[in-house]
Image: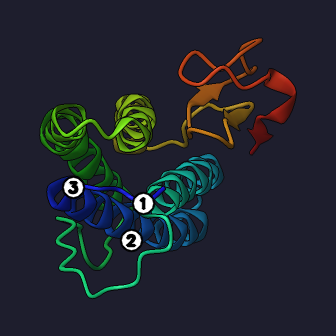
Amino acid sequence: MAVKNAMTNSFLHSAYSGESMAHMRYLIWGDVAEKEGFPNVARLFRAVAYAEKVHAGNHFREIDGETADALVPANGVFGYGKTAENLQGAINGELFEVEQMYPVYMNAAEFQNEPGAKRSFHGALEAEKIHAKLFQQALDAVKAGHDIELKHIYVCPVCGHTVLNAPPEKCPVCGTKKELYVEF
Protein backbone atom coordinates (compact mmCIF):
# COMPACT_ATOMS: atom_id res chain seq x y z
CA MET A 1 0.00 0.00 0.00
CA ALA A 2 1.37 3.38 -0.98
CA VAL A 3 2.06 6.04 1.64
CA LYS A 4 -1.11 8.06 2.26
CA ASN A 5 0.36 11.31 3.54
CA ALA A 6 2.18 13.84 1.39
CA MET A 7 4.75 14.83 4.01
CA THR A 8 5.85 11.27 4.78
CA ASN A 9 5.83 10.56 1.05
CA SER A 10 8.12 13.54 0.46
CA PHE A 11 10.42 12.42 3.25
CA LEU A 12 10.64 8.93 1.73
CA HIS A 13 11.59 10.45 -1.63
CA SER A 14 14.25 12.62 -0.02
CA ALA A 15 15.64 9.71 2.01
CA TYR A 16 15.66 7.49 -1.09
CA SER A 17 17.63 10.14 -2.95
CA GLY A 18 20.11 10.66 -0.13
CA GLU A 19 20.72 6.96 0.39
CA SER A 20 21.09 6.37 -3.36
CA MET A 21 23.67 9.13 -3.60
CA ALA A 22 25.51 7.86 -0.52
CA HIS A 23 25.64 4.39 -2.08
CA MET A 24 27.37 5.71 -5.19
CA ARG A 25 29.54 8.21 -3.31
CA TYR A 26 30.86 5.47 -1.00
CA LEU A 27 31.67 3.19 -3.93
CA ILE A 28 33.67 5.98 -5.54
CA TRP A 29 35.37 6.88 -2.27
CA GLY A 30 36.20 3.19 -1.80
CA ASP A 31 38.06 3.29 -5.10
CA VAL A 32 39.99 6.37 -3.91
CA ALA A 33 40.92 4.64 -0.65
CA GLU A 34 42.08 1.55 -2.56
CA LYS A 35 44.31 3.66 -4.81
CA GLU A 36 45.76 5.47 -1.80
CA GLY A 37 46.75 2.18 -0.16
CA PHE A 38 43.90 1.79 2.34
CA PRO A 39 42.26 -1.51 1.31
CA ASN A 40 40.35 -1.92 4.58
CA VAL A 41 38.96 1.61 4.40
CA ALA A 42 37.95 0.76 0.82
CA ARG A 43 36.21 -2.38 2.08
CA LEU A 44 34.43 -0.37 4.79
CA PHE A 45 33.20 2.15 2.19
CA ARG A 46 31.92 -0.73 0.03
CA ALA A 47 30.16 -2.44 2.93
CA VAL A 48 28.47 0.77 4.01
CA ALA A 49 27.58 1.47 0.36
CA TYR A 50 25.71 -1.83 0.39
CA ALA A 51 23.89 -0.81 3.59
CA GLU A 52 22.91 2.50 1.96
CA LYS A 53 21.56 0.56 -1.02
CA VAL A 54 19.45 -1.50 1.41
CA HIS A 55 18.09 1.72 2.94
CA ALA A 56 17.30 3.19 -0.48
CA GLY A 57 15.50 0.00 -1.49
CA ASN A 58 13.43 0.02 1.70
CA HIS A 59 12.41 3.64 1.18
CA PHE A 60 11.60 2.96 -2.48
CA ARG A 61 9.38 0.00 -1.57
CA GLU A 62 7.48 2.14 0.92
CA ILE A 63 6.80 4.66 -1.84
CA ASP A 64 5.22 1.60 -3.50
CA GLY A 65 5.63 2.34 -7.16
CA GLU A 66 4.10 5.79 -7.14
CA THR A 67 5.24 7.63 -10.22
CA ALA A 68 5.43 11.39 -9.98
CA ASP A 69 7.96 14.16 -10.01
CA ALA A 70 9.47 14.79 -6.59
CA LEU A 71 11.89 17.33 -5.21
CA VAL A 72 14.55 15.26 -3.49
CA PRO A 73 16.92 17.41 -1.46
CA ALA A 74 19.35 14.98 0.11
CA ASN A 75 22.02 17.21 1.71
CA GLY A 76 24.71 15.08 0.08
CA VAL A 77 28.40 15.77 -0.35
CA PHE A 78 29.46 16.06 -3.97
CA GLY A 79 32.90 15.31 -5.30
CA TYR A 80 35.82 13.64 -3.64
CA GLY A 81 39.19 14.37 -2.17
CA LYS A 82 41.80 12.36 -0.34
CA THR A 83 40.63 9.44 1.79
CA ALA A 84 40.74 11.44 5.03
CA GLU A 85 38.56 14.18 3.49
CA ASN A 86 36.15 11.58 2.13
CA LEU A 87 35.88 9.93 5.54
CA GLN A 88 35.12 13.29 7.15
CA GLY A 89 32.45 13.90 4.51
CA ALA A 90 30.98 10.47 5.28
CA ILE A 91 30.96 11.20 9.01
CA ASN A 92 29.26 14.55 8.46
CA GLY A 93 26.59 12.96 6.26
CA GLU A 94 25.92 10.10 8.66
CA LEU A 95 25.67 12.47 11.64
CA PHE A 96 23.25 14.71 9.74
CA GLU A 97 21.02 11.68 9.19
CA VAL A 98 21.34 10.55 12.83
CA GLU A 99 20.92 13.91 14.53
CA GLN A 100 18.51 15.71 12.23
CA MET A 101 17.01 13.94 9.25
CA TYR A 102 15.81 10.53 10.42
CA PRO A 103 14.44 11.61 13.82
CA VAL A 104 12.23 14.18 12.06
CA TYR A 105 11.20 11.73 9.35
CA MET A 106 10.33 9.06 11.93
CA ASN A 107 8.28 11.51 13.99
CA ALA A 108 6.32 12.56 10.92
CA ALA A 109 5.70 8.94 9.90
CA GLU A 110 4.52 8.12 13.41
CA PHE A 111 2.30 11.21 13.59
CA GLN A 112 0.82 10.40 10.17
CA ASN A 113 0.33 6.72 11.05
CA GLU A 114 2.69 5.40 8.38
CA PRO A 115 4.20 2.31 10.10
CA GLY A 116 6.06 1.05 7.03
CA ALA A 117 7.80 4.38 6.54
CA LYS A 118 8.61 4.57 10.25
CA ARG A 119 10.14 1.07 10.12
CA SER A 120 12.19 2.01 7.04
CA PHE A 121 13.44 5.23 8.66
CA HIS A 122 14.20 3.41 11.95
CA GLY A 123 16.34 0.76 10.24
CA ALA A 124 18.34 3.42 8.44
CA LEU A 125 18.75 5.54 11.58
CA GLU A 126 20.13 2.65 13.63
CA ALA A 127 22.60 1.68 10.91
CA GLU A 128 23.76 5.27 10.35
CA LYS A 129 24.74 5.52 14.04
CA ILE A 130 27.10 2.58 13.53
CA HIS A 131 28.39 3.91 10.21
CA ALA A 132 29.39 7.24 11.78
CA LYS A 133 31.41 5.42 14.46
CA LEU A 134 33.09 3.10 11.96
CA PHE A 135 34.01 5.99 9.66
CA GLN A 136 35.45 7.85 12.67
CA GLN A 137 37.61 4.83 13.54
CA ALA A 138 38.78 4.70 9.92
CA LEU A 139 39.54 8.42 9.89
CA ASP A 140 41.55 8.12 13.11
CA ALA A 141 43.62 5.33 11.53
CA VAL A 142 44.18 7.23 8.28
CA LYS A 143 45.23 10.37 10.17
CA ALA A 144 47.72 8.20 12.08
CA GLY A 145 49.13 7.08 8.72
CA HIS A 146 47.77 3.54 8.51
CA ASP A 147 44.79 1.51 7.37
CA ILE A 148 41.98 0.61 9.77
CA GLU A 149 42.27 -2.85 11.32
CA LEU A 150 39.35 -4.94 10.03
CA LYS A 151 38.75 -8.65 9.74
CA HIS A 152 35.15 -9.04 8.65
CA ILE A 153 32.31 -6.60 8.04
CA TYR A 154 28.75 -7.92 7.98
CA VAL A 155 25.64 -6.08 6.76
CA CYS A 156 22.02 -7.10 7.31
CA PRO A 157 20.35 -7.29 3.89
CA VAL A 158 16.97 -6.28 5.36
CA CYS A 159 17.75 -3.13 7.37
CA GLY A 160 21.45 -2.35 6.74
CA HIS A 161 22.62 -3.03 10.32
CA THR A 162 26.41 -3.18 10.11
CA VAL A 163 28.74 -5.07 12.45
CA LEU A 164 32.40 -6.06 12.60
CA ASN A 165 33.92 -9.53 13.09
CA ALA A 166 30.78 -11.72 13.37
CA PRO A 167 27.06 -11.19 12.81
CA PRO A 168 24.70 -11.47 15.79
CA GLU A 169 22.39 -14.49 16.04
CA LYS A 170 19.56 -12.16 15.03
CA CYS A 171 19.73 -8.58 13.80
CA PRO A 172 19.03 -6.31 16.78
CA VAL A 173 17.07 -3.95 14.54
CA CYS A 174 14.89 -6.20 12.38
CA GLY A 175 15.40 -9.78 13.62
CA THR A 176 17.02 -11.17 10.46
CA LYS A 177 18.97 -14.41 11.05
CA LYS A 178 22.75 -14.21 11.04
CA GLU A 179 23.04 -16.59 8.09
CA LEU A 180 21.54 -13.90 5.84
CA TYR A 181 24.07 -11.17 6.69
CA VAL A 182 26.31 -10.23 3.76
CA GLU A 183 30.05 -10.39 4.44
CA PHE A 184 32.60 -7.88 3.15
Q: Position of residue 34 (x, y in %)?
A: 60, 65
Mark 2 and mark 3: Cα distance apart in space:
24 Å
Mark 2 and mark 1: Cα distance apart in space:
23 Å
Q: Position of residue 113 (x, y in %)?
A: 26, 35
Is 78 located above or below residue 104 in the figure? below
Type of the residue with mark 2: Met
Q: Are marks 1 and 3 in contact (CB under 8 Å)?
A: no
Type of the residue with mark 1: Ala
Toward the bottom, the furthest residue is 69
Q: Residue at x 16, y 33 (%)?
A: 111
Specify the quadrant that holds the C terminus: top right
Q: Secondary structure at mark 2?
A: helix
In the image, which is nearer the foreground, mark 2 or mark 1? 1
Residue at numbered disc 2: 21
In the displayed structure, does residue 117 sit left or right of residue 88? right
Mark 2 nearby-residue class (10 Å; few <14, some 14–19, many ≥20): many
In the displayed structure, does residue 55 sit left or right of residue 150? left
Mark 1 nearby-residue class (10 Å; few <14, some 14–19, many ≥20): some
Residue at numbered disc 1: 2
Q: Residue at x 66, y 20 (%)?
A: 175
Residue 152 in which image quadrant: top right
Is 72 located above or below residue 92 in the figure? below
Q: Secondary structure at mark 1?
A: loop
Residue 85 in which image quadrant: bottom left
Residue at numbered disc 3: 5
Mark 1 and mark 3: Cα distance apart in space:
9 Å
Q: Are marks 2 and 1 in contact (CB under 8 Å)?
A: no
Q: Nearer the viewer, residue 175 or 41?
A: 175
